[in-house]
Structures are given as C-alpha cells and as structure tokens.
Amino acid sequence: MLSIQRLHKTYANGVHATNDISLEIPKGLFGLLGPNGAGKSSLMRTLATLQTPDSGSIHFDGVDVLKDPQALRRQLGYLPQDFGVYPKVSALELLNHFAVLKGLTQRAERREMVEALLQQTNLWEARRRAVASFSGGMRQRFGIAQALLGAPRLIIVDEPTAGLDPDERNRFLNLLARIGEDVVVILSTHLVDDVTDLCPRMAIIGAGRVLAEGEPQAAIETLYGRVWQRSVSDAALADYQQRLTVLSSRLVGGKPQINVYADRQPDDGFVPIVPGLEDVYFLQLRALA
Ligand code: ADP
C-alpha cells in the first residue's frame, strides 16, 4: 500500500505542480488520469524519489519514503516519460547492463532474470537486435523490462502509451495488467481508455489537485441519468455550449454530436446515454475552468 498525504510542490517559477495531493494506492493497477500539465509527472518523480516535495508525506508498506528514500529505491521500478537515448547495443546486453547497475551481481541469477524478463515482455525473439532499432511499442516493453529488474514492489510508469499504435498499446496494457496482480503499479496517462480498460482504481488530477478518486465504475454510476446526447448543426454548436454543460463534442458523419450533463432532458432532440469515464473526466475538468 502506498499512502500519500497532503503533498505540495511549487517549482522555482511559481507553478504549484502538486497542490495538497492525498491518495491511498493499494495493490493492482492504479490509473492517474489527467491532461497535460496536470502534475502527473511531478507527482511520479516525487514518488520515485527524484525530487522532494515542499511538504507532505509518503509511506510505502511502512517505509517513510521521504526520510529513507534509499529503502524505497530498492523496491522501485520506474519507467519515466522520456526513457532517453538508446545506445546501439542489443536488448540482451543493455538489459544485462541495467541489471548490473541495479545491483544484481550474481551472474547466474542475473542471467535468469534478464532472460525471463525478455520473455515476459515478448522481446525474446528480438533480444539480439539493437534497442535503437526497436519500434515505439518495443521500446516501451523494453522500458518495462528494465523497470522490473530486481522484482520491485512499486512500479511507476509515466505516460507509457503515448504514441503507440492500437495494437502495441493493447499488448503493453495487457503486460501491465498481468504485472499489477501482485504489486502496486501506477500508470499515468491522459488517455481515458487506458484507465477504463484495465484499472480497478484511479484518480483524476488537474491543476495539481485530486479531482476524483475511486473505482472507475463507481465514478461513472454517479452520472447515470444525467448525460444526454444529440447531433447539432455547426451553427448551433456555440449556442449549446453557452447554454448547457457540454462535456464533449465530436464529429459523427461530419456533424457535431454533443454530450451534455443535465438533471433532465435539455430539449426534445436529446436522448439519454449510458455515461462513460470520459464524461466523468470532462465534467471534472470543466469544474477547473
Ligand atoms: P503532466 O505530467 O501532468 O503533464 P507535469 O508534472 O509535467 O504535468 O507539469 C505540471 C506543471 O508543472 C506544468 O505547469 C509544468 O509546466 C510545470 N513543471 C513541470 N516540471 C517543471 C520544472 N522542472 N520546473 C518548473 N515547472 C515545471
């Protein structure tokens, strides 16, 4: 269990990147959902002990993380947003190198772990290829392989699906879901579907604050009977946006289709729909505006 209490972080430029964040994160996959600039990376870098907060506390399974960052690092696997430059060495060699850095000094044990991780991340066939030549999805899977070295109990992955095609994304998310069965995995993303599809728990953050927290399905149920949909003309769109709580607008067959939040049917053209997490997300973000 990861317990975050009242975390504040203000950068030198005055940006309040985490503004009183408190979260209880159990085992399993936890989705941290928020738009760009919400403060996700700032929170994750703080959890990964790469930066210190101005105030607040973090505990992981009884360890006071801010007092004893080293103890947390021994249990941590981290995949940052920009995993950086890959040298032109094979996946096998590079993962072995990371394993040495991680302190896996016993040769046989290290080899076993490196090989098992390449299998688990579906990179075994590609193990002799240079990581520099990998596709985006393969690189992300390699990133997870390095994050899993040393069997960490807290895994933090920052925006891992950005830029992946749907097939690679699915493969990557399935891999994460399997890992999440035994340990705490925090997945930050601005993609609502990443969370809907596989996170038993989540938090929506915006402007450095927790806007909502809990089970995605429970959050969705709070909107039952309150989300309405209709197609509108381009000309009428601005008027609807002004008069009603328009959550989203997308083109369907070239015509705007809007989702509206309202206690009762706004006009005859609207039909009630089963809400989704996207409706929850946009409603929360509207409250910030
Ligand atoms: P996210 O990961 O959700 O996109 P970030 O944590 O990267 O959000 O950023 C939150 C806010 O903090 C943004 O306004 C961003 O510009 C600002 N920020 C992030 N890192 C720094 C930094 N090192 N120095 C100053 N401002 C930063």
Image: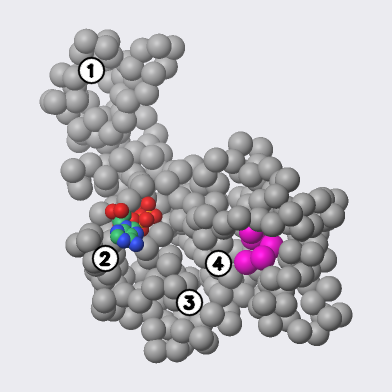
- Three-letter amino acid code at the position of disc 2: Tyr
Which of the two labelled residues, at mark 1 and mark 2, occupies the earlier sequence position?
Answer: 2
Q: Position of residue 125 (x, y in %)?
A: 85, 51
Confirm whether the magenta stretch covers residue 145.
yes
Quickly name the residue at label 4. 78
Examine the residues drawn in magenta and state their main secondary structure. helix
CB of mark 4 near ligand 1 (< 8 Å): no
Quickly name the residue at label 1. 237
Q: Residues within 10 Å of mark 1 (few under 14, many from 20)?
A: some
Do tag 4 and tag 1 residues touch (Cβ < 8 Å)?
no
Horizontal side, residue 201 vs residue 227: left or right: right
Which circle, 4 or 2, is nearer the viewer?
2
Do tag 1 and tag 2 residues touch (Cβ < 8 Å)?
no
Which of the two labelled residues, at mark 3 and mark 4, occupies the earlier sequence position?
Answer: 3
| Corner quadrant of residue 55 | bottom left
Horizontal side, residue 82 vs residue 174: left or right: left
Secondary structure beneath dot 3 equals loop
Q: Is residue 281 above or below residue 268?
A: below
Secondary structure beneath dot 2 equals loop
Secondary structure beneath dot 4 equals strand
Q: Position of residue 119 (x, y in %)?
A: 80, 59
Quickly name the residue at label 3. 1
Quickly name the residue at label 2. 11
CB of mark 3 near ligand 1 (< 8 Å): no
Q: Position of residue 44 (x, y in %)?
A: 43, 65
* Rendered-image quarter of ligand 1: bottom left
* Foreground residue among 129 and 233: 129
- Three-letter amino acid code at the position of disc 1: Leu
Q: Residues within 10 Å of mark 2 (few under 14, many from 20)?
A: few
Which circle, 3 or 4, is nearer the viewer?
4
| Corner quadrant of residue 240 | top left
CB of mark 2 near ligand 1 (< 8 Å): yes
